[in-house]
Amino acid sequence: MRTVDHVIPPGVQPDLRQHGWERDDFPDLYRQFVEPADIVVLATPIWLGDQSSQTRLTIERLYGWSGELNAAGQWSYYGKVGGVVITGNEDGGKHCAAQMLYALQHIGLTVPPQADAYWDGEAGPGPSYLDQPGGGQDNAWTTRNTVFMTWNLLHLARLLKDKGGIPAYGNIAADWDLSQPGHPNPEYR
């Protein structure tokens, strides 16, 4: 799904039509692509050494849905696996991966080892990933890391699916009514 092909306003609410926007395609995209998925992979070009604004917008909007609950009463992304794919003609692949993978795990996705793959072309104007000659599809390092990432995402998603996701004990939001004085949560203030 290409976010640039849709109207996706910025914000951290599930449906921004309820917050003044005339159109918001993200709720339908979320229900079609993310809600039923076991694996969520974000892809981005590198712009000025960082992820694109569209990628950041997608993370922002995913964050807006993180307060929803799954069938076990946990946050909506528990039991889903996340990874990232990055490409560009400048350095920044690891920087983008670090930011994106942190965001995915922070909202509840499980991130396996080697959950990113990227290709950086030669700095400056030059071939893109699919261009011949000089593109990334013949780059052995990128191909190897893409295969590692794919297998790790598939393996962890299968483990989680077979085990019914992340065990619910200890992480059901309804069990933590932080508004009550004397709540057993040691972080309660």
Image (cartoon, rainbow, N blue to C red):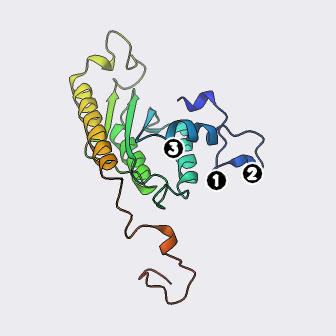
Q: Determine the secondary structure under disc 1.
A: loop
Q: Tags 2 and 1 in contact by the CB under 8 Å rule?
A: yes
Q: Considering only order in the chain, which callout, 1 or 3, is on the residue closer to the N terminus?
A: 1
- Name the spot of residue 111 as percent of width and height, x first: 33, 48
Q: Determine the secondary structure under disc 3.
A: loop
Residue furthest to the top: 133
Q: Tags 3 and 1 in contact by the CB under 8 Å rule?
A: no
Q: CA distance from mark 3 to mark 2?
A: 20 Å
Between 168 and 5, the one nearer to me in the picture: 168
Q: Measured along the vertical axis of the image, is residue 131 above or below residue 177?
A: above
Which amino acid type is shown beneath numbered disc 3? Glu
Q: Which residue is mark 2?
A: 18
Q: Which residue is mark 1?
A: 13
Between 29 and 164, the one nearer to me in the picture: 164
Which amino acid type is shown beneath numbered disc 1? Gln
Which amino acid type is shown beneath numbered disc 2? Gln
Q: Considering only order in the chain, which callout, 1 or 2, is on the residue closer to the N terminus?
A: 1
Give the image quarter of residue 72: bottom left
Q: Measured along the vertical axis of the image, is residue 2 above or below residue 83?
A: above
- Name the spot of residue 177 as percent of width and height, x first: 53, 77
> Which circle marks residue 77 in the picture?
none
Between 182 and 8, the one nearer to me in the picture: 182
Between marks 3 and 2 in the image, the one whose residue lies nearer the viewer: 3
Q: Which residue is at a point 67% across and 34% down the rendered structure image?
A: 7
Q: Which residue is at a point 35% across and 51% down the rendered structure image?
A: 110
> Which circle marks residue 35 in the picture?
3
Q: Considering only order in the chain, which callout, 2 or 3, is on the residue closer to the N terminus?
A: 2
Between marks 3 and 1 in the image, the one whose residue lies nearer the viewer: 3
Residue furthest to the bottom: 182
